[in-house]
């Protein structure tokens, strides 16, 4: 008999599961607390559950723990990259990102970047994950357990989450949202919706769906250029959802949910960092309240790219700073993301199961 993986089951599903095992429904609530609030790794830890039921559980279910295969720590900052093996042998990475020391509340904040798919089908030309191709979607349990394992290994509470690891979250919408429901539940991990960001390469239809469902998590669009033709060159998904359609979807989201979306903008030297690019970005950012994250481009030469991906170069630091200053002068909220974890291939766009 195939054993049921319990991580990823909701409160109601665990209650029904307990009932299907001939137990009272509240046993499911106990399992829920052990799995998600207390982070149990074995059934033996669940001391308020009878020995008999635990023995039945050993036979019929398993916790669904990810196996930690490797932990890489950055020499230059406190970034940590975890490599997890899944039940079927596939692997994904998650990255623990330290806060910038000067930022308010930095000592209490700890962010994890989680993966949502094994590989990614979208083939963005600047992204290491895109070169891997796509294997499968992760389950909600596999997403949630990245957080539980990172908490266990770091011995610290994860306070913030970004769905920006391997994969396009919107292509795995149901499991991603189920994982968020568990992670934000105050009977489980109790992470605030304001502390969770879901990023998309540009699925306008799912952005609208998030708005219609009044999903209160933060939304980030990986925009990178407003030029539709250029964007199609580096992000083929643009053929399906062109830039104007994406901006309309963002406006729809803002007006329904009343949360400012973030535009993610990786700066490539001479490609999207000209004065004309800046002028267009300022104009768009003023249409309704939004934030802009400027991201330095991190080399993915280790993936041996060809074509346009091999030609992209990072914008020099001074230009990134002047770009940011011009946006600030135009009263746009802008943040320049740091490049933590670059030395362990853990920075933005570098996740591809590689070690430096
Ligand atoms: S940037 Fe995101 S969507 Fe694009 S290939 Fe990489 S993981 Fe996929």
Image: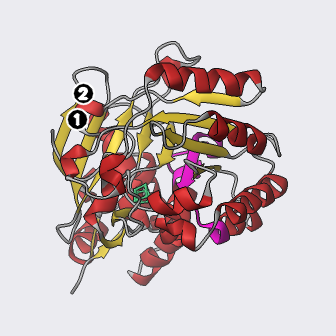
The residue at 55%/36% (across/down) is 273
Give the image location of residue 309, x and y in percent.
34, 53
Q: Secondary structure at mark 1?
A: helix
Q: Quadrant of ligand 1?
A: bottom left
Q: Which image quarter holds the C terminus?
A: top left
Q: Are marks 1 and 2 in contact (CB under 8 Å)?
A: yes
Q: Earlier in the sequence, mark 1 or mark 2?
A: 2
Front residue (pair 198, 158): 198
Depicted 351 relative to depicted 174: above or below: above
Q: Is residue 320 visible?
A: yes
Mark 1 is surrounded, within 10 Å at the Cα level, by few (under 14), some (14 to 19) or many (20 or more) other residues, namely many
List the residue tagged with mark 1.
344
Q: Which residues are magenta?
A: 183-206
Give the image location of residue 224, x and y in percent.
55, 47
Q: Is residue 46 visible?
A: no
List the residue tagged with mark 2.
74
Front residue (pair 178, 64): 178
| Left or right position of 78 against 334 | left
The residue at 45%/39% (across/down) is 268
Q: Which image quarter holds the N terminus?
A: bottom left
| Residue 351 drawn in magenta | no
Depicted 115 relative to depicted 161: above or below: below
């Amino acid at each position: 008999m195939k054993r049921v993986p319990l991580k990823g089951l909701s409160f109601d599903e665990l209650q029904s599961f307990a009932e299907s095992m001939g137990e009272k429904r509240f046993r499911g609530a106990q399992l829920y607390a052990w799995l998600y609030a207390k982070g149990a790794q074995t059934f033996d830890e669940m001391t308020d559950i009878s020995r008999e039921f635990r023995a039945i559980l050993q036979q019929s279910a398993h916790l669904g723990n990810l196996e930690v295969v490797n932990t890489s720590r950055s020499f230059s900052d406190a970034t940590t990259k975890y490599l997890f093996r899944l039940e079927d042998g596939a692997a994904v990475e998650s990255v623990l990102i330290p806060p910038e020391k000067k930022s308010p509340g930095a000592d209490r904040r700890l962010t994890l970047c989680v993966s949502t798919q094994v590989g990614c089908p979208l083939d963005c030309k600047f992204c290491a994950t895109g070169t891997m191709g796509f294997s499968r979607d992760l389950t909600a349990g596999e997403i949630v357990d990245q957080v539980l394992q990172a908490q266990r290994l770091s011995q610290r509470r994860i306070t913030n989450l970004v769905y920006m690891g391997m994969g396009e979250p919107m292509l795995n919408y149901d499991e991603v949202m189920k994982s968020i429901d568990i992670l934000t539940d105050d009977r489980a991990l109790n992470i605030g919706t304001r502390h969770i960001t879901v990023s998309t390469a540009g699925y306008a239809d799912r952005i609208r769906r998030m708005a219609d469902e009044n999903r209160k998590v933060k939304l980030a669009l990986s925009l990178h250029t407003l030029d539709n033709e250029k964007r199609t060159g580096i992000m083929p998904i643009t053929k399906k959802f062109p830039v104007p359609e994406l901006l309309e979807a963002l406006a729809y989201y803002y007006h329904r949910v009343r949360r400012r979306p973030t535009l993610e903008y990786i700066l490539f030297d001479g490609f999207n960092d000209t004065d004309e690019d800046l002028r267009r970005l300022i104009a768009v950012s003023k249409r309704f309240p939004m934030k802009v994250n400027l991201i330095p481009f991190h080399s993915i030469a280790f993936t041996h790219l060809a074509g346009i991906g091999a030609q992209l170069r990072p914008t020099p630091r001074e230009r990134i700073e002047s770009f940011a200053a011009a946006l600030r002068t135009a009263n746009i909220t802008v943040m320049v993301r740091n490049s933590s974890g670059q030395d362990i291939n853990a920075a933005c766009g570098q996740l591809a199961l590689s070690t430096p």
